[in-house]
Amino acid sequence: MSKLSIVIVNYNTKQLLDDCLASLFAAESPEGGLEIIVVDNASADGSQAMVKEKYPSVVLIESDENLGFSKANNRGTAVATGEYVLFLNSDTRVAPDALAKPVNYLKQNPKAGALTVKLIYPNGERDPDNHRGFPTPWNALCHFSGLSKLMPNNPAFNGYFQSYADFESIHPVPVIAGSYMMMPMPLCRELGGWDEIYFFYGEDIDFCYRINQAGYEIIYYPEVEVIHYKGASSGLRKESAHLAKPPRETRIKVAKESVRAMQIFYGKFYKQQYPWLLTAVVLSGIRLRGWFRILKHQLT
């Protein structure tokens, strides 16, 4: 038996969530079946009523406040009963083989601690955030300075997005996104789930770091594709600006959290590994970039 639990965190993405759930019910179920758990972060767009009316078999957990991504995912896994768990964004639409094939791969490869698939935008472009290196000071400096764009095929200078990789082959990757992250449930529980100190952004990098620390590989599995509308809940992404625009207060909060997330990550994992001056330079770059992002949403 290999029952799969799918945990979806939703915040004001009613139509996208509907499309996501419809695609899940149309997909091939893994051996042992699946359960779908939606954790709603106090949506005000009727998402909860839609789930109850159209998908009565879905386990709906309703929160009276926005818990953030990590805490909501942990609430979902607390009631999950599967041998494997898939953390899936509400702004995705899965292919018919996007559940059974990845579960089978994990069953056959016990050293795989997590797996993702090929996430693509509606226009067919690959989502680069789903195949990354860790934001070490060097990788971050190359990324923020533009060196990675000047030399995209050089591993020494493009260690963050790793655009030199073969995206058609199955291979290990340091960091994947929480948009589609499948893993064995025992490992998820062993690692304590998602770190709830993060509200939004950075929590997937943190989780991947701990999976690597535990001695497991994270697998990029491009044999199936999943459409990702990207950032519909946060309102920070141009890819989904035409689909959803959260309130200004939400966008500003998420922008601030994106800065705080990197500060948390560096303090947690890199503070003792690198000279303080180098880390300070990187964090200053993150704060500066974040300031412009926050200002943009304060003015719109």
Image: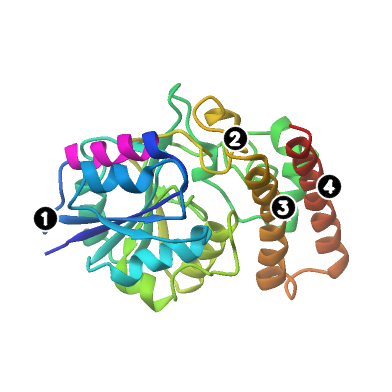
Q: Nearer the viewer, mark 4 or mark 3?
A: 3
Q: Quadrant of the N terminus?
A: bottom left
User: As displayed, is residue 192 above or below residue 184?
Assistant: below
Quadrant hosting residue 263: bottom right
Can residue 18 be found in the magenta stretch?
Answer: yes
Residue type at mark 3?
Answer: Lys
The nearer-to-camera label among 1 and 4 is 4
Q: Residue at x 49, y 50 (%)?
A: 177
Report the amino acid beneath label 2.
Arg
Q: Can you identify the residue that label 2 sits on?
A: 237
Is residue 141 in view?
Answer: yes
Q: What is the CA distance from the residue labelled 4 to the residue labelled 2? A: 18 Å
Q: Earlier in the sequence, mark 3 or mark 2?
A: 2
Question: Distance of mark 4 from mark 3, alpha carbons?
Answer: 12 Å
Residue sitting at 26 percent across and 35 percent down? 95
Kindly identify which residue carries mark 1: 31
| Label of residue 288 in the image | 4
Q: CA distance from mark 3 to mark 1?
A: 42 Å
Q: How does the figure colour the protein chain or chains? A: rainbow
Give the farthest residue toward the right.
Answer: 277
User: Position of 202 compared to 290: left or right?
Assistant: left
Residue 207, horizontal then vertical, whole percent: 50, 64
Judged by depth in the image, the label closer to the viewer, 2 or 1, is 2
Number of the front mark, 3 or 1: 3
Name which of mark 2 and mark 1 comes first in the sequence.
1
What element does badge 4 sit on? Answer: helix
Residue type, numbered disc 1 = Glu
The magenta span reads 16-26
